[in-house]
Amino acid sequence: MFKVAIIGSGPAGLSAAARAAALGLSHVLLEKTDHLSDTIYKYQKGKHVMATPSNLVLRSDIDFDAGKRETILGIWDEQIAGHKVNVKYHAEAKAIRGTGDPIPGSVQQIVSRARDGTKNVKEIQRHAPPYAIELTNGETVMAENVILAIGTQGNPNRMRCPGADLPHVQYQLDDPAEYVDEHIVIVGTGDAGIENARGLAEDPAQRNTVSILNRGTEFPTAKAANVSALMADHEAGKLTVRNESETKSIEPGWITLTTRDGEIRIRCDRIIARIGSAPPRAFVEECGIEFTSEDRGAFPKLSPVFESTAPGIFVIGALAGYPLIKHCMNQGHDVIEFINGNTDLKPADEPIIAAKFANLPGNRSTEEWLEFLRANVSILNGMNPLQMREFMLDSEAKFYAPGEVIFERNAPGSSLFGIASGSVAVEVNPADPSITIPIETGSIFGEVGLISGRRRGATIRAAEDTIVVEISRLAALKLQSQVPSAKKAIERISIERQLLQMFGSGLTREDVAPLVEAAQVQEKRAGEIVVTEGADDKDVYIIRRGSMIVEKQIGDRPVFLSYLPAGSYFGEMAVVDGSTRTATVKAAIKSEVIRLPGEGFLELLEKNPRLRERALKDMEGRRATNAFIEGQKDSFSGAVDLYSKTAQFLVDNGIGEATDVLLIDEKLCIGCDNCEKACADSHDGLSRLDREAGKTYAHLHVPTSCRHCEHPHCMADCPPNAIKRGPDGEVFIDETCIGCGNCQRNCPYGVIRMDAKPPKKPSLLQWMLFGKGPGPGEASYSWRKKAAEAEGVQKPKQAIKCDMCSGIDGGPACVRACPTGAAIRVSPDKFLTFTKLTEDAE
Amino acid sequence: MASKAAGKATGGTGRFTQDEQRRDSDHVSFLKHKGFRWLWIALGLCGASIAGYLLIDQQPRPNGGTWYGYTLGTIGFALILWLSLLGVRKRRINPGVWSLKAWTSAHVYLGLSLIVIGTLHTGFQIGWNVHTLAYVLMLLVIFTGIYGVWVYATLPQSLSANRKEMTRKQMLEALTAIDRQLESAAQPLGRAEADLVIEALGQDIFAGGPLARLTGSYPGCATARALKSIGGSSEAATRVTALLEKRSEQLAQIRGQLRIRAMLEIWLFIHIPLTIALIAALTAHVISVFFYW
Ligand SMILES: Cc1cc2nc3c(=O)[nH]c(=O)nc-3n(C[C@H](O)[C@H](O)[C@H](O)COP(=O)(O)OP(=O)(O)OC[C@H]3O[C@@H](n4cnc5c(N)ncnc54)[C@H](O)[C@@H]3O)c2cc1C
Ligand code: HEM
Ligand code: SF4
Ligand code: SF4
């Protein structure tokens, strides 16, 4: 029986084990592989590992500093041996059971969802420690305390056909260059599978015969860019894509497939299965550990000492929601101290959090400030002290004097504000700043930016001495997944405000209260129809997030009428004049709408004649657009068709979720690549756009370049949270990037590249006069490599992408550098209109 | 950059209005830029010069040596220097709030106005001297420029159509892939035929020199030759023929791309050196005028 068993030897588990060894606690470190720290072990060879955040001190018995993957792993191996840590390899935990008495009233509910949406709830009675840890090899390890540090990788899904356990079936590919002269079958056509297949087939000198199996004929889980590259390789004969094929059985040297045309047996020396991985959540829940919500992004519920809902089981590291190595190691150290009875230990991030409160008036300690915010801001009420600390790492507390601007109308921003003391005034009428609406202590503001991803709708000033907490988008998302009541409150307030804003001033909260009550938030898939032309349903919708396109059937084809960004409403025509729907409205991208019952909406109009007027005026405008396009259709049907198809093409290429996107009119583009050169010369010598790549329709080309999405996919999973929205609305990556490549994988448009900053080039003058250096634009790879070697310092590969030339006078260099006017940057709400799309640009 | 993110929650950097204008921009070519602004300015300049020429009584006769002639000469010289600066502007994007499209638009129209200003400056006195040399060089630069504008306005569409969403790299990769298939498909062929294929594969696709590149006609194309000579109905021969056809289509695309790009660029190889010659000649012209008045 051990005092502690630590499961997982990543940075978190390692550090915990080393602390336990140093304190002389009886311990065991269980690791499922045959080496330490598998996640880091699997990084690319030579990867430069970064030690972010730089302002956090490391508190661990094991050393860690930025450096090469190999060096770091080497040091860890050595020090773990030096500390005489009791490591048990090939020890994969598959279940953890309490062996003590049943804990009264302590029942774990596990909710699982089937594909068809039905829920299944399973209940497990928790038992007191000590715990029995069952390993996959049949052994059992007993421990009083368990520390779960298994990271978030989970397990790859396994193949299940006969022969799946043969040694030539593998679930990972480290180095495609390692294999030569083999017949290799890749199973699974997600991004990982496609990348592996292409990697293995890339160099003909390796003489591999590569096939990739696709269950259907589409590639729903892969990025479009990957799919087209794969198909190109297939066409080119580099590899074979086998559609509608599944494995039936595996034998040494051969594989049998079931295909549409029956069974076939082909040669096969190696199988690489990339069929996704199961997140560790199911295993964790089975141990009696509750998560904060059903959300896929939710983390286990933890106490301030990292204890889960199962007494004696602690969760740390990436699994606990801390994805950086330094955080992980600090927690490993701390959790052992806690288990060992050290209750005075202050968290390592104390100085960082203390600094956040340093400039606020009113001498309070960090704990008192955290409690002050938690108690006063209503959406934070449901948080515990540990959650508050973590929350504060991604948030800021700020003081504003009366009259000071907190944010301005049209400023970009996706953070949420909570008022901890004082109150603010919202300038609802841009023409007359004296008209304001107050928001009081405890409430929130800024939620529109958070939810819709669009710019601030009004200027907000402090009305008195005010302390607010600015909650970053990330922290706000976490908060909503951790505290369901906060999510509800934010939703309610946002609906109310959206209604108040919809028709400008003049409405009060009481006016809209019944509608808010009846409102319903609905999610819509991309392409899902919300309103159907000719139907006679009577609801009004507000677009809360995402965007919609309006279409009308004219003749035998749907014609694109207009594009509706988040914040717009639709469906009011049928309600006001009782007609059937005059057009079809469908989601351009994944969206959320607020559905308001028609009667409630009518009632509101009846009570407010001014509002009615506004609505009628808006309707007038929409009718005019429709009539205009219908009119054009009679006389210029070609132009309307072109407009309709071009709009659809742009929406298909992600313009619907863009805020600022580069387009190239190929009727003007002379192919000089001056845009790319200017981009490279404005940004450390690397171009962030690929002009030629990308799709084209009717000579309108969408190059591979960032669209600055309303809700950037790239932000989803960035460990140091390095991707932000800047002051001009640009999505940019700051220097804390650790080069993990998550964003590159998450961006559906393939616009992020990973590369090292090259050394500076000789000046333009030197080049023009003496031919020194590579000249304007991105230097060739070989020049960069040589110059970097000459300079001696190796720079890490980091993620780079367009930042809309923020900080550069005059705006985006690509557009400014185009000699003919072919390159333009536009936003969808302005560009997806008849005049812009059919304009003849020569 | 981090400071920027943490920075003010208020107002941004004040680029918003500028950005909004840009996002709302009409997509308009350099020729139509701002409603032909520079065309009108150039026409005004020409009109004024002609009016001055006709109205001002120049003694003893209109030429470069009268005060009006000096004025036109100075304007012309300044214009030429400014026009040449486009070469620098094009390669130096920062700092400064400016757009190359506006510069090109102004360059074209003001450059054209030099025909009028320069000619009036000569007072129609042409001879075999450095002065006339400068004048002729100027006209040559201008005429190549006119060709440039013509190709800029007419060729991009074909460039786009020829590309079919492929990048240069992809075109070359597609060719390599076909070649790899050809190599193995040609194995069963007879010696003579196989040699034809090997010759086709071995030929540098860029062979043919600048003339071939510009005209798109490659009389020495080994792929075409192989395609003509390999016949027969054996399985191998049909397969090789099909692949050779694919190869020649791919070659045609690459060559089309090269040809259009060459036509879009070739004139700059005259325009720029002549500009340098022009500035040299102009310098000589100015110095000689001042020294030997
Ligand atoms: C490509 C990439 C680059 C990155 N670069 C950086 C960087 O430069 N700097 C940085 O700070 N962070 C970086 N990160 C993030 C960092 O690697 C992780 O957040 C960190 O490794 C998490 O540590 P952990 O200890 O919680 O879990 P992990 O490191 O994931 O370790 C979990 C361990 O548990 C083992 N295990 C899992 N399940 C079981 C089981 N059932 N039984 C027994 N053992 C089990 C695994 O084999 C593994 O060894 C990067 C991540 C990636 C993917
Ligand atoms: C004496 C007059 C002129 C001079 C000295 C001059 C000089 C130049 C120079 C130095 C360049 C830069 C080329 C490069 O670096 O790539 C240039 C480009 C160009 N010039 Fe002229 N030019 C003159 C007149 C004209 C005229 C009259 C026209 C058109 C009618 C014209 C059209 C162009 C065009 C289209 C470009 C290319 C712009 C680009 O691709 O960026 N030029 N010229
Ligand atoms: S990098 Fe990709 S996901 Fe991120 S904002 Fe740009 S286009 Fe959108
Ligand atoms: S910016 Fe991209 S590569 Fe860099 S740390 Fe974030 S997700 Fe990883």
Image (cartoon, coloured by chain):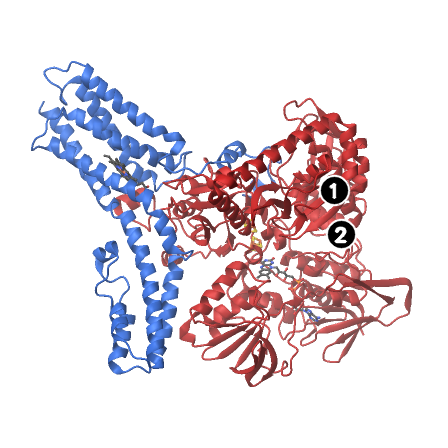
Q: Position of residue B12 (x, y in %)?
A: 57, 35
Distance, label 1 to label 2, CA atoms, is 36 Å
Q: Position of residue A739 (x, y in %)?
A: 54, 56
Q: Which mark is residue A482?
A: 2
Q: Image check: A658 left or right of A824?
A: right
Quadrant including the N terminus of chain A: bottom right
| Pointer 1 with pointer 2, Cβ within 8 A | no
Q: Residue A265: in sight, yes or no?
A: yes
Residue at image mark 1: A538
Question: Which chain: blue?
Answer: B
Q: Residues within 10 Å of mark 1 (few under 14, many from 20)?
A: many
Q: Residue at x 78, y 50 (%)?
A: A484
Q: Residue A806: in sight, yes or no?
A: no
Q: Nearer the viewer, mark 1 or mark 2?
A: 1
Quarter occupied by residue A547: top right
| Residue A74 higher or lower than A565, as above or below | below
Question: Which chain: red?
Answer: A
Name the one closer to the observer, A253 or A134. Answer: A253
**Dot 1 or dot 2, earlier in sequence:** 2
Name the one closer to the observer, B23 or A379. Answer: B23
Q: Residues within 10 Å of mark 2 (few under 14, many from 20)?
A: many
Give a yes or no on whether discs 1 and 2 share a subunit.
yes
